[in-house]
Image: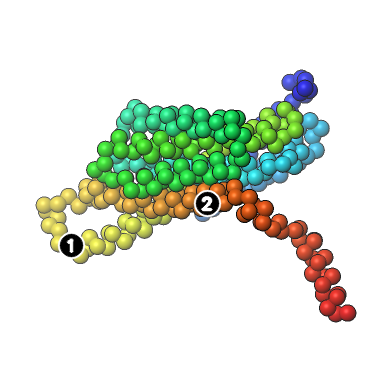
Amino acid sequence: MPKRCSLRGTDWQGALLICLTMLLYSYIFVYGDYYRWLASQHIRMAVALALVSTGLTIYRLSHNRYPYVELELLKCKNVVPILIVTTLAELAFGAEHTLEEILYSEVVELEELTKESQYLWTLPGMFLGIALDLYWLKVQKWKIWKLIGIAFLSIFSYALLMYTTIGTDVNIEQYRLAIILRGFGYGIISPALMWALQESVTRLELFFMGLFLFNITHMYLGGAMGYGFYATIFSHFLNEDMMHYGRLLTLTNIDLSQFNFGAFMGGDYLHAMMLVAIKQVYGYVIWFSLLLAAIFLLCDIPAVRTNIRKVPLWPVLAIEYLSERRKSMS
């Protein structure tokens, strides 16, 4: 039975310190591309404050008698791998937060109601993903490795469909299958990781602490990191494509008296370059998600999983090296 504890004994100061730290990291990742990362004084100050806040948070969690999150949680089996997989999944799903928003808002120029109606097509995929989780983990009691691999395969299929479908003359209804696949992958991986978290901890209090860390990794670190990462590489590809294809315009004969060159550059040309950059970023998402899917599907094979040699700690390697050297010298 879980221990009853009063709300007065809760480390609210530690909770506020954790939230402040996460807000600083979110600010860095979300506005980093806008302010040109460490070239801006805003981001440098935010990084310094985030490091100081991180140090204070770790100090309080390790020295407080009843911390908001016990560091014992990180010693539980599979908790750290779960947080790592959550971060990788959010990096893959960051393409949805960034690239689809650019596509619908800047290129296609959809109204907010139409855009949100388009996003509602994630719900059927999420329901299917949750149903597969229940069947896989509750009914069949199969291992979770292959299930996570299926989730990353769903992200791969989503990115591949967007890569092959995206264009200026494409109806928005053609993106719905890709959106359903995105929701399917999200519906698989989120409950599956929480299920794995519940199986890894020993106490109910630790589970809720782990759930708190899971949501921090999901919403703040992974989500904001994915947004900042994709926004940065999108800006890089967009600038590079505009320079590359812009040089070709100098080879054409254009009658400027009959052609509005400024409107063309700010309209059709810019939108075309955005589509090219979006496709390039989706190409990276395809390879990234395919690599993660292959890793988890291979780990599900017992012959592969049991033959992976665990690398010992550095002191163990040093002791082995010195003993072999003494033997050779003697």
> Where on the picture, by quarter, is residue 145?
top right
73 above or below 47? above
The percent position of residue 229, horizontal first and vertical second, equals: 49, 49
Q: Which mark is residue 294?
A: 2
Q: What amino acid is found at the position of numbered circle 2 in the picture?
A: Ala
Can the viewer see residue 220 in this picture? no
The residue depicted at 62 percent of the width and 34 percent of the height is 141
The percent position of residue 8, horizontal first and vertical second, equals: 76, 21
Q: CA distance from mark 1 to mark 2?
A: 47 Å
Is residue 94 found left or right of 118 in the rendered image?
right
The residue depicted at 27 percent of the width and 59 percent of the height is 246
The percent position of residue 37, horizontal first and vertical second, equals: 51, 51
The residue depicted at 40 percent of the width and 29 percent of the height is 120
| Helix, strand or loop under label 2 | helix
Q: What amino acid is found at the position of numbered circle 1 in the picture?
A: Thr
The percent position of residue 61, horizontal first and vertical second, equals: 75, 37
Label 2 environment density (alpha carbons within 10 Å; few <14, some 14–19, many ≥20): some
| Helix, strand or loop under label 1 | loop
Quarter of the figure with the C terminus: bottom right
Can the viewer see residue 192 in this picture? yes
Query: To which residue does mark 1 refer?
Result: 252
85 above or below 124? below
Quarter of the figure with the N terminus: top right
Q: Residue furthest bottom?
A: 329
Label 1 environment density (alpha carbons within 10 Å; few <14, some 14–19, many ≥20): few
